[in-house]
Image: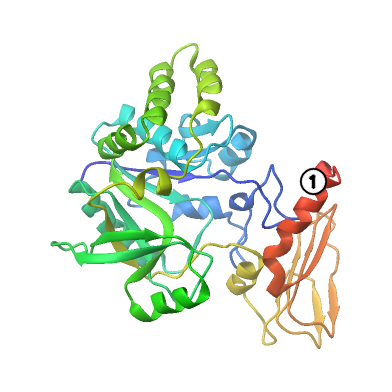
Amino acid sequence: MPKVYAVIMAGGAGTRFWPASRSSRPKQLLPLAGESEETLLAATVRRLAPLVTEDRVVVVTGEHLADATAKAVPGVPRSQILCEPAPRNTAPCIAWATATIARLDPDALVAVLPSDHFIADEEEFRRVLARALRSAESGRVTTVGIVPTRPETGYGYIELGEPIEGDTGAKRVARFVEKPDRATAEQFLAGKRHLWNAGMFFFRARDMAELVVRHLPELSSGVAKIDAAAGGANAAEVLKAVFPTLPSVSIDHGVMEKAEGLAVVPGEFGWNDVGSWQSAWELGAPDEAGNSLSAGAVAIDSKNNLVRTLGKGKKVVALVGVNDLVVVETEDALLVIPRERAQDVRLIVDALKAAGRTDVL
């Protein structure tokens, strides 16, 4: 197999895990899975080995996150931490990173992965990725779809087509499906012909470049200008001038939904997109009452609560007679919210923005 490189998408606005996450510390830079102090980004890079070593990892993040990202993954060469001067969605992110890799190795295989997911079974995850990479080596742009475990309405889906010959377990992608309503999601779960779209893509660098030229020519032209200037005296100037002008479009809408002959490899490896404090509770280590507590927290006659104390002072958080809460304490903020409304944290962020409280965002 040709050399395999990984593109780790590590931008983010830091809204869903407020007050722990901030604009300068989005969720991939936080230890949100279980009791580990390992950040989600560091875990993403670590679990790729030995398929992809750190010297062949490219992390794409925002300019304001450059130092924090480098600190989180010290084994990744600083030259391979690409800093976007403006957020432009996943298609520009992937196209720029792919061009960078193609300059290093024109024959490279590329795995594109989000930086902020949790994987329970890392060995099975690597086995699935190896199958997806073998599929991509044959010239098929390939994705990994997650076998659904519930009728989820918050994810997009991939409809399965016919099996593809070979030992990869890949099937043709019949189509990508937008987030469904509850009834449709229940049909997808029962029919066993749909997978969750987890945003993982695998391809030969030259195949992705061709798809971007075909379906997003304006993006291809802009990335070519950035790539031509790379390493030169005016590289930073060209990047700052060109990147914000690139079309802001997702790789799904811009390329994948238009491309033909795509493949998908089903995966079952304990995937969780760590989408809210509810996910953090699910991934925690609950006691016999279902409470997932930071060290020193106390819960009496209380069930199924999440408590995270993140301030330097480590205040003692004590719960009595309350159930199903999320309590998150930092040095300058305190969140108390019902677990079932964990997604509504973004409403707090919106309210703070409206009030001009950028000091806590």
Task: Classify residue 197 as left or right of residue 21.
Answer: left
**In terms of depth relative to the viewer, which is nearer, 250 or 342?**
250
Task: Classify residue 282 as left or right of residue 342.
Answer: left
Q: Relative to residue 202, is residue 217 depicted above or below?
A: above
**In terms of depth relative to the viewer, which is nearer, 259 or 329?**
259
Circle 1 packing at 10 Å, graded few (<14), some (14-19), many (20+), is some
> What is the three-letter code of the residue carrying label 1?
Lys
Residue 354, x across and y down, in percent = 82, 46
Residue at disc 1, secondary structure: helix
Residue 300, x across and y down, in percent = 82, 85
Q: Residue at x 58, y 54 (%)?
A: 39
Residue 194, x across and y down, in percent = 36, 69
Task: Classify residue 265 as left or right of residue 354.
Answer: left
Q: Tell me if residue 153 can be seen.
A: yes
Q: Residue furthest top?
A: 233
**In terms of depth relative to the viewer, which is nearer, 101 or 210?**
210
Q: Residue at x 45, y 61 (%)?
A: 156
Q: Tell me if residue 48 can be seen.
A: no
Asked where in the image residue 69 lies, by quadrant, the reply is: top right
Asked where in the image residue 125 lies, by quadrant, the reply is: bottom left
Q: How many marks?
A: 1
Tell me, what colour scheme is on the image?
rainbow
Task: Classify residue 152 as left or right of residue 208.
Answer: right
- Tag 1 residue: 353
Q: Residue at x 42, y 47 (%)?
A: 253
Q: Residue at x 48, y 78 (%)?
A: 183
Q: Relative to residue 288, is residue 94 depicted above or below?
A: above
Residue 142, x across and y down, in percent = 29, 53
